[in-house]
Amino acid sequence: MSNVIHLPKEMRAISIKEPGGPEMLEVSNVPLPVLKATDILIKNIAVGVNRPDIAQRTGHYPVPVDANPLPGLEVAGTVVAFGGEVVNWSVGDEVMGLTHGGGYAEYSSVNFSHCLPWPKNFSPEMAAAIPENFYTVYYNIFMRSNLQKGEYFLVHGGSSGIGLAAIQLAKAKGAVVIATAGSDVKCEFCLEQGADKAINYRTEDWPKIAFDYTGGNGIDVALDMVTGDYVQKEINIMARDGRIALIAFLGGPKAEINFGRVLRDRITISGSTLRPQTNNEKALITTKFSEDFNDLMNEGIVKPHIFKVFDLENASEAHELMESSQHMGKIILKVV
């Protein structure tokens, strides 16, 4: 390592004993991560909890061979060391970063080009809620789906961390935002966060209501973390040249689709997750997101909503809450 301050040889971290329930998360002492030439070492203050962490814990999200096997994809803290090829970062800087695993720990090694400074007036918990969710949304609805001002945008799971990021980013760029959520309370919360229309998918016919809200024009861009039978329902209500972006499959990875409407109306269906993207691709996402939304974050117009904060040692409780789907907004681990 170069450009370092005094560092311990080991750190506290949350590891996965074996695939299974939240009880499989355990506190352990592990060596500090290896610092590559393009990495900065972050002393974590806060760590975001995400659905991929759950999938990794249960054995349904294989860790890439070059990734840190510890869970955790986004962190906020301070720079304590950096490699020889790092530019624009110094020891002591406040940083939020997209990790390649290894976030559930006292220290994380992160490619410097996947990091951004904390926005003004952000707490570390707020900063830790940005990289995974906001980068994912930005990449899929703007870089891949080219959402434009005035277009109709549909997002499922509107009260989740991803959903709220989508509502805020789409609304900030002038789209008309329609969100679905699983209760009237969650729908009201989506409206408070900026959605133009919120639909309770448990009690209402969301495809019909969403389509009618567009005045019969159809949805221009849909961000879908459910997949399954939702895909055909979305196809049925898309506008001509509509774009469906698939980012997860909480409703199952398989779907029966009638491609007639897809061909006739030139509908595009794309899919991606953030973790498998290359370092250069993640760097581009980071740069473009910052260019488009840094000022809005500094002004407090775009910001995450923190639902609950747990100590790192209580990561299992955080996972239990996420799996209950009772939260509205972001769940965070605090490294104390």
Image: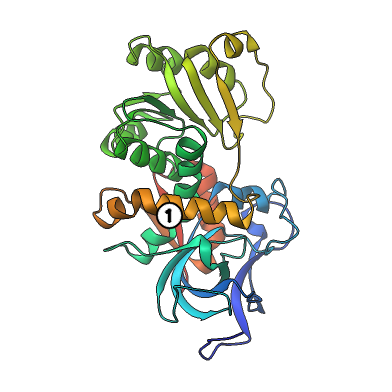
Mark 1 nearby-residue class (10 Å; few <14, some 14–19, many ≥20): many
Q: Is residue 234 left or right of residue 55?
A: left
How many marks do you count on the picture? 1
Tell which of 69 and 120 is nearer to you.
Answer: 120
Question: Residue shown at 67%/21% (left/top)?
Answer: 255
Above or below, 193 relative to 12: above
Give the position of the N terminus as an image quadrant: bottom right
Residue at the spot 43% in from the left edge and 14% down from the top edge: 205
- Residue 107 seen anywhere in this rendered image of the structure: no
86 over 138 or under it: above or below: below
Q: Position of residue 22 (x, y in %)?
A: 62, 54
Relative to residue 120, is residue 161 drawn left or right? right
The residue sitting at the left extreme is 299
The residue at 58%/9% (across/down) is 261
Using the rendered image of the protein, determine whether residue 204 is visible from the camera's viewpoint.
Answer: yes
Residue 108 picture quarter: bottom right
Residue denoted by label 1: 130
Q: Quadrant of the C terminus?
A: bottom left
At x 58%, y 51%, the residue is: 281
Which is nearer the eye, 104 or 141?
Answer: 141
How far across and down, in percent of the image, does residue 234 sit?
52, 19
- The residue under label 1 is which amino acid type? Ile
Under tag 1, what secondary structure? Answer: loop
